[in-house]
Image (spheres, rainbow, N blue to C red):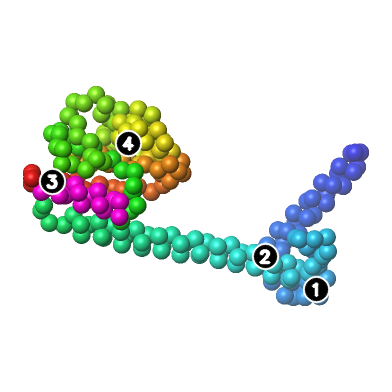
């Protein structure tokens, strides 16, 4: 390319920028020059033919409308899912209302997780609780100084639920032999810094409990369980 050609291209670019800037400052230009508007042609977005500027604007607006409709549909889907979740939490709360013996409270928690939330892979670890043959199989009772709790120290320190992957040793401790088949887990500390223990929910689906998901529901679930277990008298 010669120096003259380069200068020519630069001049064209500058002229186009000036035209674009002028049209932005004067959006009513085409209202005053409708004949110019009618002669403008643009490549069709889905083919080699051309369309008028007005037709292209209509096409862009349709595309934007379709995008907004998709977003609205997603918002409606999320709202419906949240409504269903709120109803499940309400049913779970009603199960735990009232002072009942600790074993009964645990039985109600197990039934609520299974029936209201389809949590068929759940483990409840109670810290400092003595062994009780009458407890459901999903309950694990451990001493406060149990070495297997060491791997959950950061979870207890945060006091917040955590979702995602877990170590093989953690999954096996929580779920037994089935633990290694868990693709993702939700770990929920119960009580201040896990003073009561923790709830673990597992799924074979690696994306069921992922790090980016909201844990607000799990936190509320933990509060309900902790309150119920704390006030439940011994059997």
Looking at the image, is mark 4 or mark 2 nearer the viewer?
A: 4
Residues in magenta, as a range = 101-115
| Residue occupying the point 33% across, 53% down | 117
Residue located beneath label 1 in the image = 38
Above or below 162: residue 112: below
Element under disc 2 = helix
Q: How far apart are the alpha carbons under marks 4 and 1? A: 71 Å
Residue located beneath label 4 in the image = 175
Could you say where residue 210 lies in the image, as x and y percent from the top left? 43, 42
Above or below 233: residue 150: above
Could you say where residue 3 lies in the image, as x and y percent from the top left? 89, 39
Along the line of sight, the residue nearer the viewer: 48 or 221: 221
Q: Is residue 59 found left or right of 218 in the rendered image? A: right
Q: How far apart are the alpha carbons under marks 1 and 3? A: 80 Å
Q: Is residue 201 magenta?
A: no
| Residue occupying the point 83% across, 60% down | 48
Residue found farthest to the front: 133
Looking at the image, is mark 1 or mark 2 nearer the viewer?
A: 2
Q: Is residue 46 found left or right of 149 in the rendered image? A: right
Rendered image quadrant of residue 95: bottom left
Element under disc 4 = helix
């Amino acid at each position: 390319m010669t120096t003259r050609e380069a200068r020519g291209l630069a001049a064209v670019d500058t002229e186009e920028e000036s035209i674009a800037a002028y049209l932005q400052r004067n959006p009513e230009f085409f209202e005053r020059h409708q004949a110019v508007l009618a002669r403008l042609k643009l490549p069709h977005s889905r083919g080699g033919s051309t369309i008028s500027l007005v037709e292209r604007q209509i096409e862009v607006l349709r595309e934007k409308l379709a995008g907004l409709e998709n977003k609205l549909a997603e918002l409606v889907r999320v709202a419906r899912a949240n409504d269903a979740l709120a109803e499940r939490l309400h049913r779970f709360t009603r199960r735990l209302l009232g002072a009942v013996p600790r074993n009964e409270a645990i039985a109600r928690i197990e039934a609520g997780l299974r029936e209201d939330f389809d949590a068929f892979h759940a483990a409840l670890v109670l810290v400092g609780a003595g062994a009780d043959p009458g407890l459901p199989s999903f309950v694990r009772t451990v001493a406060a100084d149990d070495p297997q709790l060491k791997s959950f120290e950061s979870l207890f320190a945060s006091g917040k639920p955590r979702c995602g992957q877990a170590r093989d040793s953690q999954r096996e401790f929580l779920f037994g032999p089935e633990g290694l088949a868990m693709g993702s887990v939700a770990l929920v500390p119960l009580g201040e810094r896990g003073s009561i223990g923790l709830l673990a929910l597992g799924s074979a689906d690696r994306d069921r409990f992922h790090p980016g998901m909201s844990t607000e529901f799990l936190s509320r679930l933990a509060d309900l369980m902790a309150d119920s277990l704390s006030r439940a008298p011994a059997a």
